[in-house]
Amino acid sequence: MKYGMKDIAKRANVSLTTVSLVLNNKESRISTQKKQEIKQIAKEMNYQPNSAAVLLSKQISYNIGLIVPDITNPFFTELTQFINRKLRENGYFTLFVDSGNSYLGEKQAIQNMISRGVDGILLVPSSEFFSADQDEVEQLFKSAGKPIILLNASTDMDISYVNFNNVEGAVMATQELVDHGHRKIAFIKGKDHLVNAHERYQGYQDGLRKNHIPFEQNLVFEGDYSSESGYHLAPQILKHPEITAILSSNDLMLFGLIKWSKEQGVDIFNRFSMVGFDNTPYTEIIEVPLTTIDQDADKMSADAIKMLLRKIKGKRDVTRQIVIKPKLIRRKSVKFIK
Amino acid sequence: MKYGMKDIAKRANVSLTTVSLVLNNKESRISTQKKQEIKQIAKEMNYQPNSAAVLLSKQISYNIGLIVPDITNPFFTELTQFINRKLRENGYFTLFVDSGNSYLGEKQAIQNMISRGVDGILLVPSSEFFSADQDEVEQLFKSAGKPIILLNASTDMDISYVNFNNVEGAVMATQELVDHGHRKIAFIKGKDHLVNAHERYQGYQDGLRKNHIPFEQNLVFEGDYSSESGYHLAPQILKHPEITAILSSNDLMLFGLIKWSKEQGVDIFNRFSMVGFDNTPYTEIIEVPLTTIDQDADKMSADAIKMLLRKIKGKRDVTRQIVIKPKLIRRKSVKFIK
DNA sequence: TTGAAAGCGCTAACAG
DNA sequence: CTGTTAGCGCTTTCAA
């Protein structure tokens, strides 16, 4: 059986108000004795507040929406786990949606979440997000009426976000390769409209320039961050005998490449030096552990949550953006050129 | 600005009821014209129903709770993604919680979800779940007052579940190894109280017996399904020169073993034939692709959802259990003994 | 120190 | 065919 405040009030011979007051630890001059008693009864009856009712009257749900493009991507998996835990520690619950990497999915998710009364939303935008009509997006955000924060993305729009410094990361990665004597470095990029993809591409070019290595368009290959796309790109890359190293916009695409090589019996690790992006966990168990750019997902999440909770608590926080420094993790996939 | 039914009613010069009726597509003799008009206005005002209010009056939230022990485990990741999508297709939203593999986490999650008015819960129990007091668990389920279904687990309690036939899977795996000439087969088991772990252990023993191979207690090692536990078990296993093959209760523990070997420079793939459990995606990109037992997570999820929605819709469904046949996926980690 | 009552946005009898 | 009204469970102002 499910009991409500009314039942407790009856059992304790007090009014509904009294019960509400003590169960919410509100300032009041109710005798300590009565307080104890009421709390005791509530416990006995296994009282659980009906949050729909609370939401309706307080307009606070203690629910936060989380939208990621693809939970299957280990980087997002870790992020989700961390956010879920952190939110719970702060008394919030997670409404989770995997947008299926589509803007439509994101839009529906946002509207649904708002309709469900979330107090705020953490959005890791898909690659489609930024190719959607900017005005529509801003409209969507405004009409939500609740704070929404972007993770793992930057934007010119008047929206708060926390992101990594992707340019810097890619420069570091490129430098690492150059330092090992590589000059013909292939780059696997993501779709252009994704700001992160763009920035990593930018960093790759900057890194080349810094070292006076000419940029060659035919050494860049475009995937979509999925393992499959790396898989499909593999044969094209292998066609270039001059390439000695590969920098990939993320680990996953490298995994696809590796899978293909495995199937074809080519010794990819011997053929190329490689560095990835994301420091995805499986990077450590593959044949030769991958050197990669670590994006501290936990820090990003923590910052985003802090920001969101501040906004929720009504601190008239202006739009802010946080940019986090990436780190190079050296493992075994980069070798000196022969 | 956020508009409600009242605003629409005012704008359309009709009563609240009328609006509610047409927006919910209820049987009514309201002129088609008025219906169109109202819907039009609703669209213009970007009306989004307040689901707290709906829930409060209808007692239906169209929210389903999903609890998994560890979203980081690729098997659960895939499950989560599938469930999330499937539920959305059915008009439901997912309240997600990573229980951190603890019974306390699960209990809190359940209570929280109920308090938030979910219509039902899909629970993938942690390894702690079954070591909790059975009576308390049954009590918890009863007091929830909403249908709860177990995934990836079996139980004697009066609870519906869908699970794989783990015994059969483990027998198949063992047989595969035996068929390749192995007789000294190590087994990495999970914690005993987890029924699945127990069943896989059982299957391993059955498989041995069927082939008249004596069971040896000192060839079995206990982990907890995490990659770390495999990592820690590695040195112990390597101490046994007689072992030629390893059957692991899941892929993850094998991954841990591989990681350790990598660090120590031992050629683990050459040393042992191995078969895992779960057909986790990364199984394909590691040095030598893993032979494993495939558990069709999508089928399991689909069955569980179907079952749950039936219960929610009030079909007085009795407690039912579904058991799914596993499949052996042959890759490269099993070789004939020399 | 405590209680009555209005209201949050929507649904569903019941009346008209 | 459409409107009135009484809740759903809880919070909060105001009064006692």
Image: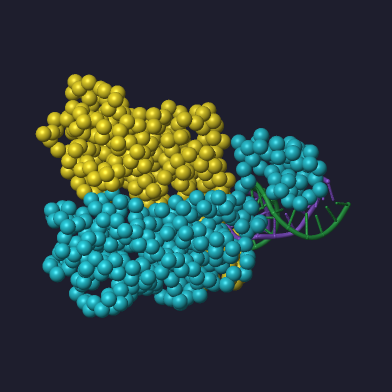
Chain colours: A yellow, B cyan, C green, D purple
Residue B278 seen from this side: no
Residue projecting furthest to the left: A338
Image quadrant occupied by the N terminus of chain A = bottom right
- From the top left corner, tell me how far across and down residue B187 is, in percent: 25, 69
The front one of B210 and B224 is B210
Residue A22 vertical position relative to residue A230 in the rendered view, above or below: below
Dividing the picture into quadrants, the one containing residue B108 is bottom left
Q: Residue at x 22, y 21 (%)?
A: A214
A315 or B328, nearer to the observer: B328
Q: Position of residue B277 (x, y in %)?
A: 33, 62
Instruction: State the residue in front, A275 or B66.
Output: A275
As rendered, which of B161 and A135 lies closer to the eye? B161
**Which x, y percent locates residue A311?**
45, 40
Q: Quadrant of the C terminus of chain A?
A: top left
Residue shown at the point (19%, 57%) measured from the top left: B269
- Residue at position x 61%, y 39% from top? B2
Location of residue A10 (image quadrant): bottom right
Q: Tell me if residue B177 can be seen.
A: yes
Question: How many marks can you see?
Answer: 0
- Up-down relation of residue B108 to residue A256 (above or below): below
State the image coordinates of residue B33 (x, y, percent, origin top left).
Answer: 79, 38
**A113 relative to A123 in the view: left or right:** right
Q: Is residue A186 left or right of residue A80?
A: left
Is the residue A210 above or below the residue A333 in the image? above
Give the residue at x 28% y 62%: B275
Q: Quadrant of residue B168?
A: bottom left
